[in-house]
Image (spheres, coloured by chain):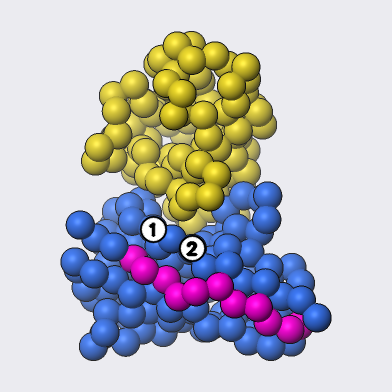
Amino acid sequence: EIVLTQSPGTLSLSPGERAILSCRASQSVSSTYLAWYQQKPGQAPRLLIYGASSRATGIPDRFSGSGSGTDFTLTISRLEPEDFAVYYCQQYGSSYIFGQGTKLEIK
Amino acid sequence: QVQLVQSGAEVKKPGASVKVSCKASAYTFTNYNLHWVRQAPGQGLEWMGIIRPSGETAVHMFQDRLTMTRDTSTNTVFMELSSLRSEDTALYYCATEPALGYKFDYWGQGTLVTVSS
């Protein structure tokens, strides 16, 4: 079974800065099957990115996804106060696996 | 606007079963995959299983303990987890996936299941 490892575990940044979150797969994954979610405290996860680089409906263009093979990245170009949350990557292989999450906190 | 409304919080004793419902509005389950995902307190997301438009189910790592069913007349899907243990204490979410979408685009609000003696 594919394992997704997200890094860093916690990322401390200030509003206005750029955030780069990594998701590494234990074996090659089709970009079609890679998604990113945002979760704020007390809320259900929200789909941000699917197919590695396509933004979901209503997601601001400061969020972008990239990558292929085993290495994928979620970039938030200029952090807004509402972006501080936990981010998960997910892939579909024989099952739907989530990474362990990256907590993006205010510095 | 698609909405998934889940049943309320449950408290169960170890060894018991729990059944959580997820009712959809604005579309029908027969056109989408429906997933169950859980999140233990302070932990990450764990995919549990899928029920497909055909009614076929697939379960991940819960073997015989997890049963997913649906009632097409009420557009409701059910998740039943048996032989509960303390480690099953978690928030349980349902989420939709459009056919071949590989993305969970709509989520229920979550149902807290607490297993405690």
Against B62, is A90 above or below? Answer: above
**In-front residue for pair A96/A94:** A96
- Residue sitting at 49 percent across and 43 percent down? A39
Q: Position of residue B10 (x, y in %)?
A: 59, 77
Kind of residue at disc 2: Gly
Chain letter for mark 2: B
Q: Quadrant of residue A101?
A: top right
Against A19, is A2 above or below? Answer: below
Q: For the residues labelled 1 and 2, say whether their Cβ atoms are less than 8 Å apart.
A: yes
Q: Position of residue B115 (x, y in %)?
A: 71, 75
Quadrant of the snapshot with the C terminus of chain B: bottom right
- Residue sitting at 27 percent across and 79 percent down? B75
Mark number, residue B107: 1
Kind of residue at disc 1: Trp
Q: Secondary structure at mark 2?
A: loop
**In-front residue for pair A65/A16:** A16
Quadrant of the snapshot with the N terminus of chain B: bottom left
Q: Quadrant of residue B96?
A: bottom left
**Residue B38 located left or right of residue A43:** right
Q: Is residue A2 visible?
A: no
**In-front residue for pair A7/A94:** A7
- Residue sitting at 43 percent across and 66 percent down? B94
Q: Position of residue B32 (x, y in %)?
A: 27, 67
Q: Secondary structure at mark 1?
A: strand
The question of residue A17 being in magenta is answered with no
Any idea which chain is the blue one in this picture? B
Mark number, residue B110: 2
**In-front residue for pair A43/A65:** A43
Against B106, is A40 above or below? Answer: above
In this rendering, the count of numbered labels is 2
Magenta span of residues: B4-14
